[in-house]
Image: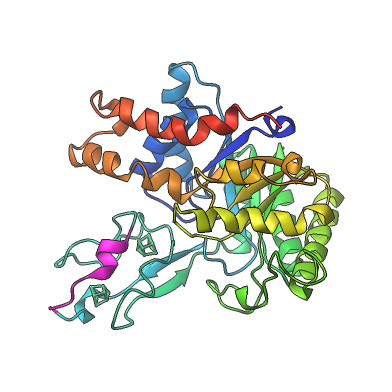
Amino acid sequence: MALAQGRWVKWIGGASNQDQAAIEDLAGLYSLVGVHCLDLAADSAVVAAARRGIAWAMERGAPPPWVMVSLSDGADPHFRKAWFDPRCCPPGCSRPCERLCPALAIPPPGAPQGVLEDRCYGCGRCLPACPHGLIEERDQLLPAAAVPPLLAALRPDAIELHTRIGRAVPFAWRLAQVRAAGIPLRRLAVSCGLEVEGRGSGGVARDQAPTGDSPGGPLATPLANRLVAELWDRFAQVRGVGFAPLWQLDGRPMSGDVGDGTARAAVQLLRRLAPALPPGPLQLAGGTNGRTLALVQDLNGGRARQVAGVAFGSVARVQLQDLLGQAHGRGGRLLDQEDLLPRAIALASALVTPWLNRSR
Ligand code: SF4
Ligand code: SF4
């Protein structure tokens, strides 16, 4: 119903985020304020943590959101973690990596690990920040044989497959692994943007990206045409095996920002591609934030009506990071801190409620 009304909201926990304490708190909070879906790493402990959060919200009257888990058909910035050896860091380093990390995944000097793996969700902010080039990214991809039994054990309501231009065949392989799990799915979501296979896991093909001012119109560039063609290929694949698609246009993957610029990226992509997209509900992601709804509502030519909803990732976590830190510093859940909880609920609600009340 929410998809049909354009009011669908998904909270993105992070395809490689294994911070169970934060997942439990954020899953509980965003379930309580009414999101329709929680998008999680395909990890038993993560899904269990999210389900504890959902149970907390349901005790307070919230309906249960869908549990979605994310997979990728190849290298992807959503499926990576940062890594460095702290023994290589010069003692005088001012530690920009530690200051920039939104997940507090880089501990102070003296810790045995450079990056706390469970906390890192691969946002990439630290990668260019090291003046000595010590931080590398490591892909986190599930082997093919692990997918069917894992999905059969997790029993999610929906699955999201991250794909990329040029990956029709790897997508088909992942889809076959999902089918082999033999679980019923409410939706098979497909997440794709303007990234091109072969440019590295964080490589973004923005050099060829079309602009809204392209001569000849919004589909004037070969890259945009390729993306549309690839989405129609994924549509044929997904429908061919009997799943119902849900499209996620990923405007600026792993942006982690809250400004107008990142919000515009997702909406611009929609503006360029909307008339040519295959059938199925469409949600925006990648740089989405509190500005996104106003930008969507300003779209003309019926494009606003094409938007079934939104997915909030980094912004949903960053705005609660301080409260999470305070609660976890006390050794407890944010969900159980009576002095912090009202503020946390207010912040989560302020992000989500405008979409829940949207009229098209
Ligand atoms: S900045 Fe991002 S990529 Fe780097 S450690 Fe923190 S969460 Fe991981
Ligand atoms: S910025 Fe680089 S050298 Fe400095 S602490 Fe971080 S990883 Fe080490």
Q: Which quadrant of the figure shows ligand 2?
A: bottom left
Please name whichever residue, 268 or 236, is drawn nearer the observer in this view of the structure: 268
Residue at left 41%, top 51%? 18
> Is residue 209 in view?
yes
Which stretch did the figure color magenta? 91-101
Image quadrant of residue 186? Answer: top right
Picture coordinates of residue 150 (x, y %)?
57, 49
Picture coordinates of residue 295 (x, y %)?
61, 46
Please name whichever residue, 234 or 311, is drawn nearer the observer in this view of the structure: 311
Answer with left or right where residue 145 lies relative to residue 273: left
> Is residue 161 in view?
no
Any magenta on residue 105? no
Q: Above or below — where is 66 with respect to 143? A: above
Answer with left or right where residue 279 lies relative to residue 76: right
Any magenta on residue 93? yes
Residue at left 83%, top 56%? 276
Residue at left 84%, top 49%? 239
Answer with left or right where residue 188 lies relative to residue 228: left
Q: Above or below — where is 271 with respect to 24? A: below
Picture coordinates of residue 116 (x, y %)?
30, 60
Q: Above or below — where is 60 with respect to 214? A: above
Please name whichever residue, 306 or 331, is drawn nearer the observer in this view of the structure: 306
Instruction: Identify the image quadrant of the N terminus.
Output: top right
Answer with left or right where residue 51 lies relative to residue 175: left
